[in-house]
Amino acid sequence: MTISRRNVLLGATAAAALGPMAARAQTSEVAIGVIYPLSGASAQIGVDAQRAFETAADIINKNYDFALPLAKGEGLPGLGGAKVKLVFADHQADPQKGRAEAERLITQDKVCAVIGTYQSAVAVTVSQICERYGVPFLSADNSSPSLHRRGLKFYFRASPHDEMFSTAMFDFFDVMKKKGQKIETLALFHEDTIFGTDSANAQTKLANERGYKIVSDIKYRANSPSLTAEVQQLKAANADVLMPSSYTTDAILLVKTMAELGYKPKNIMAQDAGFSEKATYDAVGDKLEGVISRGSFSLDLAQKRPMVGLINEMYRAKSGKDFNDYSSRQFMGLIVMADAINRAKSTEGDKIREALVATDMPGDTTIMPWKRVKFDEMGQNNFADPVLLQYAAKNFVTIFPEQVAVSEAIWPMNK
């Protein structure tokens, strides 16, 4: 009898001959696939993600006094104390490479679940492969709203999507207008993959509903060698708020080009991505004082929830960086998936899926400012409350919503 591909067995070969039930009973390690860009232009994202997942695995596999699922005690008690083993794969920011790597993780490395992927375009193909094999996929940090609306049974996302993030932005605009600030016109600037397209669609819909005028809507080619023509259009439009949806290399090029052409937006409200990355601020941070980006994590939360600061210190020891919007979601992605595997008491895909469907994790047992983690019928957690962060004096501070804000917004950022 052979072992099902959904079972993970790294024990003795004699156990394998006994069949799946015996194999699960003797499992000493549970393999989880982690698929990120580990080479190419987005390689640093992948490296940071590795450190976030390793931090989470360390907390699961060892004993820590945190009010976090699986922190206390060692390993997964539901599987006899089995340890989580991470199997990393490099999708190189290529959806087809992601498809091939996901299949390899499932068929060769025998992972029981997959987590990824940073680029939403890669999440499309990876999640399709997982669906075909009946292996749960957790979208740790992908934000395109369309991802959870494809009718997939094995797709789950604990973090917000761009409609939720964009709603927070427009809620903020409404509040600032009530305080007397002039916010009438918007300029959308977005790359041409599913991330940028979905983001622009969400923002266009909200602008129409809330009465804001879009005076420029620029869709550009991702990883473009030049953005001069596009920035000239943005400068001519001179909107009250520039709203970019760009990955890191594009974000850096955009800011450099704006400086070269003498364009200083009155305000920038960014859809995260490159505008949350340390690499962007290392390169052009002197030109981004006052920029606002949406997020799903704030280190300010450590003031109310001390374990957030302690876990951040663990991550910083591995990466040399504080948690940001991506690495925090990656960390929680593994916690959520491992918690489900533990409650399933199995490495079978169907049973893990059932446990994910039953997930109901209180927000105060996470490192995020979320109400809870509970998935709807499409696998989306609608209780993941976004925050808005402003870059000031070389740090990000939470400015919205008001109940978690630690600072007033600097508005406009360029007078």
Image (cartoon, rainbow, N blue to C red):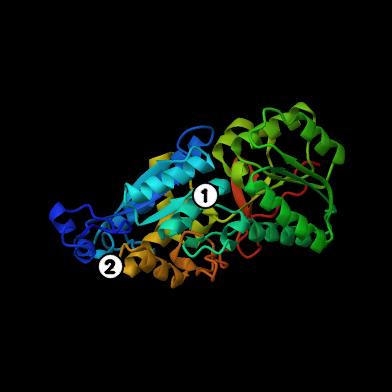
Q: As drawn, which residue projects farthest toward the left?
A: 14
Apparent side of residue 280 relative to residue 353 in the rendered image (left or right)? right
Amino acid carrying label 2: it is: Gly
| x and y percentages locating residue 170 in the rendered image | 74, 59
**Image quarter (top left, top right, bottom left or bottom right) of the N terminus:** bottom left
Which is nearer the N-term, disc 1 or disc 2?
A: 2
Task: State whether residue 271 is above or below residue 347.
Answer: above
Residue drawn at (76%, 49%) of the image: 411
Task: State whether residue 253 is above or below residue 110.
Answer: above
Callout count: 2
Please indicate, yes or no, whether residue 308 appears anywhere in the rendered image.
no
**Image quarter (top left, top right, bottom left or bottom right) of the C terminus:** top right
| x and y percentages locating residue 26 in the rendered image | 19, 61
| x and y percentages locating residue 331 in the rendered image | 44, 53
Closer to the camera in the image, 356 or 336 = 356
Task: Name the quadrant containing residue 60.
Answer: bottom left
Q: Which mark is residue 317?
A: none
Closer to the camera in the image, 360 or 394 = 360
Task: Name the quadrant containing residue 345.
Answer: bottom left
Apparent side of residue 395 relative to residue 186 in the rendered image (left or right)? left
Identify the residue position indicated by label 2 in the image.
78
Q: In what element is the residue under mark 2?
A: helix
Q: Circle 2: is it few (<14), some (14-19), or many (20+) Cα within 10 Å?
A: some
Please indicate, yes or no, whether residue 147 appears anywhere in the rendered image.
yes
Q: As drawn, which residue projects farthest toward the front?
A: 1
Q: Circle 1: is it few (<14), some (14-19), or many (20+) Cα within 10 Å?
A: some
Task: Name the quadrant containing residue 66.
Answer: bottom left
Of marks 1 and 2, the one in the foreground: 1
Amino acid carrying label 1: it is: Thr
Task: State whether residue 309 is above or below residue 377.
Answer: above
Identify the residue position indicated by label 1 in the image.
125
